[in-house]
Image (cartoon, helix red, strand yellow):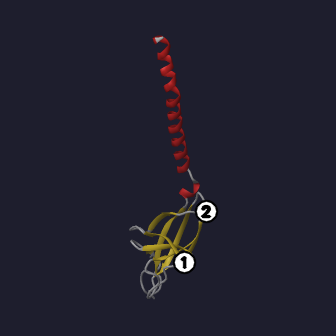
Amino acid sequence: MGDFAAPMKRNNLLLPCSLLVLFFALALFSQANAGSDSSAKSGMEGTILISPVMPGPTREGMSDSRPLPNTEFVVRQGDQTITSFTTDDAGNFRVSLPPGHYQVTRKEGNRGAGFFGPFDVDVAAGKMKSVQWKCDSGIR
């Protein structure tokens, strides 16, 4: 009887262990698929420039614009603020967004001289929309 009971105990553990392994495999599979959601990889990236950078006419051989560094912008959808971002030293930015239509403007708005948006952008599922916007410094 002792020889018969040992295999039965092993078989009784086999099913729960198999179910546990299956559970962890399904959990890993669903987590991997959640990371491949196409909307998770959508958003916009680009460069924001400011122009003109000097008063008077544009001089031949000299750029009339430069990157707009370290400036905070807000992303809105209608009246709702969705997120914000700050340009880097080279005026570049990258922000993840779900698909949709957005307006982007400088956080401080358009107080005083200059124009800093709103800029309209449409974000598609699974795509990073590349943009280059030029703000008006108001210098004349």
The amino acid marked with disc number 1 is: Asp
* 57 shown above or below 23: below
Residue at 43%, 86% (x, y): give it.
55
Residue at 46%, 81% (x, y): give it.
109
Q: Determine which quarter of the picture holds residue 121.
A: bottom right
The residue nearer to you, when weighing 3 against 75, is 3
Tally of numbered discs: 2
* 102 shown above or below 33: below
Neighbour class for label 1 at 10 Å: few (<14), some, many (≥20)? few
N-term mark: 2 or 1:
1
Q: Mark 2 points at which residue?
A: 124
Circles 2 and 1 in contact, beta carbons < 8 Å: no
Distance Cα–Cα, label 2 vs label 1: 21 Å
Neighbour class for label 2 at 10 Å: few (<14), some, many (≥20)? some
Residue 36 % position (x, y): 55, 50
Q: Which disc number belongs to residue 137?
A: none
Can residue 15 be seen by looking at this rendering? yes
Query: Secondary structure under badge 1?
Result: loop
Can residue 64 be seen by looking at this rendering? no
Residue 71 % position (x, y): 41, 74
Residue 60 % position (x, y): 47, 78
Query: Secondary structure under badge 2?
Result: loop
Front: mark 2 or 1: 1
Q: Which quadrant, please, contains the C terminus? A: bottom left
The amino acid marked with disc number 2 is: Ala
Residue at 48%, 21% (x, y): give it.
9
Q: Which disc number belongs to residue 79?
A: 1
Residue 74 % position (x, y): 47, 73
The residue nearer to you, when weighing 53 against 89, is 89
